[in-house]
Amino acid sequence: MPTEPEAPGGRLALEHRTIEVIPDDERHGTPRSQFTLWFGANMQITAIVDGALAVVFGADALWAIIALLIGNVLGGVVMALHSAQGPRLGVPQMISSRAQFGVYGAALPLLMVILMYLGFAATGTVLAGQTVCEMLHIDNTKVGILIFGALTAVVAVLGYRLIHLAGRVATVVGILGLGYLLIRLFTQYDVSAHVGEKGFDAATFLLAVGLGAGWQLTFGPYVADYSRYLPRETSDRATFWSTFSGSVIGSQIAMTLGALTAAVAGDAFLPDQVGFLGDLAGPAFLAFLIYLVIVVGKLTVNCLNAYGGFMSVLTIVTAVNGRSRITQAARVAYILGFTAVSVVIAMAASADFLSNFKNFVLLLLTVFTPWSAINLVDYYVISRERVDIPALYDPDGRYGKWNVTALTCYVLGVAVQIPFLATKLYTGAITKKLDGADISWIVGLLFTAALYYLWARRTANPPAETIRPGGTAAPEVRVEAMSG
């Protein structure tokens, strides 16, 4: 198998780009890198738990697996459409959203995105910290959290290429580790006796669809951060399918394992997910290897959280100070600061706090569907993939400081979901009539897309062709269209 072209400096070189446009002479790699990154990032314990929750909510394991697949496919389409923007524009995802929201206006959804990153980084660090303690036979979970936090900081600081390397490693160990656990599950338990016990239930089925879709939608605000280094002539279709297949297949395997495990184990799994999987592995040596698989998988996705959180903070800061680049020292400081905050939250979290914080994070997911709808409708339908890239960094440029159309649609898109929410913090009136089925993300996506399209087609002012740094407008180099 041929190796991918690498950027100068090698895989372990410190990344020197942040939110600025990636020049063509620094573009490298193939869409295959997107498959391994997102496959590896999804083959991890939090996805296993996500799949288990579908059964805990009351769904039969068989119907839960089908529903999770539907949700992963629907959410994966949205997520992969964001990824396809990366090679074309060469800028981070949330920088490109300035074309819809304005240079300052893009900060509104970014604040919620940063809270999500912190929440997922903290909860992931707790699980990984427990795993490190199991591996090293340490009684103090906080020590394991500190060790894992340090690993996350190192990989995130080194940046793009090492994160992709972690994804490739996670792909291999994930296939081996989770495949082994599936085999052990079928040999140690009578799985068939726990599948198909319950009939179809619409409410729990829709809840499981929401779990799968919500999982994929959370990647939307930063998925293009990892495709922006691909050469500009990279096929839209290749980028889309590599990202989509990696994320959907990886998450579905992990969630299927989770659903089946929850079905056969009952209440024994959720209180101690790490310990249960270690016991399922069998002998101590094999348990150690499974713990290593968990750590590698969590390291990959936690680095995505730390890297994405840093990029989001920087996007807000540079919108105010007008800069598009920062020093290496500042870059390292931002990443270390973000990682440190997530570690502090993880160490301070009691069991109750962690549960409540995860519910708070799930509530924050309502902000991503309207953002995705606006970004995708504008990019693919209104602007037809034509972007004034220098204006993304200029508050006085084409996109201005604030875009009233997008911001209004965004707020209304969040508000319209409230009656359909189903969380421990709040359950909407319509959701109660649907027996607890959460369809808020469907409502938010469709409503916001329709409203923004009808409004923005009268107010948007896209360039005739994509304008790149240097002030020139030039036709895009395209291999094939997404609809071809």
Image: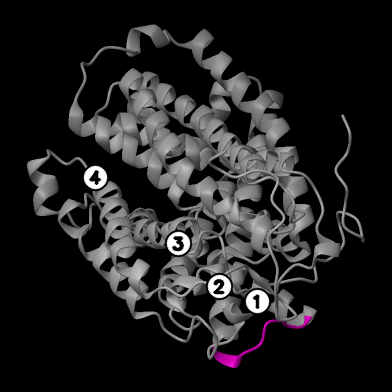
Q: Secondary structure at mark 4?
A: loop
Residue 225 position (above or below residue 209):
below
Mark 1 to mark 4 CA distance (whole Å): 36 Å
In the rendered view, would you say 265 is above or below 141?
above
Asked if labels 1 and 3 touch by Cβ distance under 8 angstroms, the answer is no
Residue 321 is a magenta residue: yes
Q: Is residue 20 above or below residue 165?
A: below
Region rendered in magenta: 320-327
Q: Where does label 3 land, which residue?
A: 375
Which residue is drawn at the image coordinates 56% and 68% (left, top)? 96
Q: Which numbered mark, 1 or 2, is in the foreground of this view?
A: 2
Decide which of tag 3 and tag 1 comes sooner along the chain: 1
Residue 45 % position (x, y): 53, 38
User: Which mark is in front, 4 or 2?
Assistant: 2
Q: Which numbered disc flags the more N-terminal residue, 1 or 2?
A: 1
Label 3 vs 2, first from the N-terminus: 3
> Residue at point 24% right, 51% down?
443
C-alpha gap between disc 1 and disc 2:
34 Å
> What kind of residue is marked 2?
Pro
**Residue 350 in sight here:** yes
Looking at the picture, which amino acid does disc 3 mark?
Answer: Asn
How far apart, in angstroms, are the residues tagged by discs 3 and 1? Answer: 26 Å
Residue annotated with mark 2: 463
What is the x, y in percent for residue 343?
A: 56, 64
> Residue tagged by mark 1?
334
Using the image as rendered, state which of residue 396 and residue 47 is in the foreground: 396
**Residue designated by label 4:** 439
276 horizontally vs 458: left or right: right
State whether residue 134 is above or below residue 234: above
Q: Secondary structure at mark 3?
A: helix
